[in-house]
Amino acid sequence: MLCPDGIFERLSRSPFRSGFRLSPADRAYLQTKTFATIERHARDFVKARLAPARPSKDGRQTPWRGHPVFVAQHATATCCRSCLAKWHRIPKAVALTQAQQDYVVGVILTWLENETKV
């Protein structure tokens, strides 16, 4: 699944979404893990917290800190099903397909890669 046209550009225009940055602890964590490990974490979080049609605690399932992937999810509006619907045009109340999960993970990893270059 491809990113909707200009998703990162649109996110950058949101004062809320564009305000997220990795903390020094998040950056240090990323330096101690391989890309494959971070990708596995992102896949696990997406599968457990976003993929179900009606995730438990939807709208509150993604912590604000504690893992770089969580920060990336808020920055990229991949934190809950409402944000996925609004920003990424992925409908609510329908389980995410594998392609949609791959897309969400790709968005998260792209943000993390861009953020660590800064």
Image (spheres, rainbow, N blue to C red):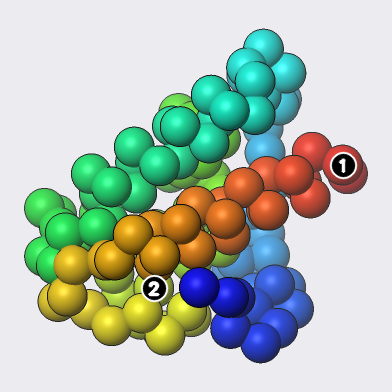
* Picture residue at 59% right of the left edge, 76% below the top: 3
Q: Identify which residue, 19 or 2, lies in the foreground.
A: 2
Q: Which one is earlier in the sequence, the residue at label 1 or at label 2?
A: 2
- Where does the image place residue 17, in percent across and percent down from the top left? 60, 66
- Distance from label 1 to label 2 (Cα)? 25 Å
* Picture residue at 50% right of the left edge, 52% below the top: 105
* Picture residue at 70% right of the left edge, 83% below the top: 6
Judge whether residue 75 can be spotted in this image.
no
Judge whether residue 66 can be spotted in this image.
yes
- Where does the image place residue 79, in percent across and percent down from the top left? 39, 58
Residue type at the position of mark 2: Leu
Circle 2 residues within 10 Å: few <14, some 14–19, many ≥20: some
Q: Name the image quarter holding residue 10.
A: bottom right
* Picture residue at 22% right of the left edge, 78% below the top: 92
Residue type at the position of mark 1: Lys
Q: Name the image quarter holding residue 31.
A: top right
Circle 1 residues within 10 Å: few <14, some 14–19, many ≥20: few
83 vs 111, left or right, is left
Task: Assign the C terminus to one quadrant of the image.
Answer: top right
Which residue reaches farthest top?
32
Q: Say which element carries label 1.
A: helix
- Where does the image place residue 13, in percent across and percent down from the top left? 71, 80
The answer to whether marks 1 and 2 mark residues whose Cβ atoms lie closer than 8 Å is: no
- Where does the image place residue 36, in percent across and percent down from the top left? 58, 28
Q: Identify which residue, 9 or 37, lies in the foreground.
A: 37
Label 2 sits on residue: 84
Q: Is residue 40 above or below residue 9?
A: above
- On residue 117, the disc is 1
103 vs 62, left or right, is right
Q: Say which element carries label 2.
A: helix
Q: Is residue 59 above or below residue 42?
A: below
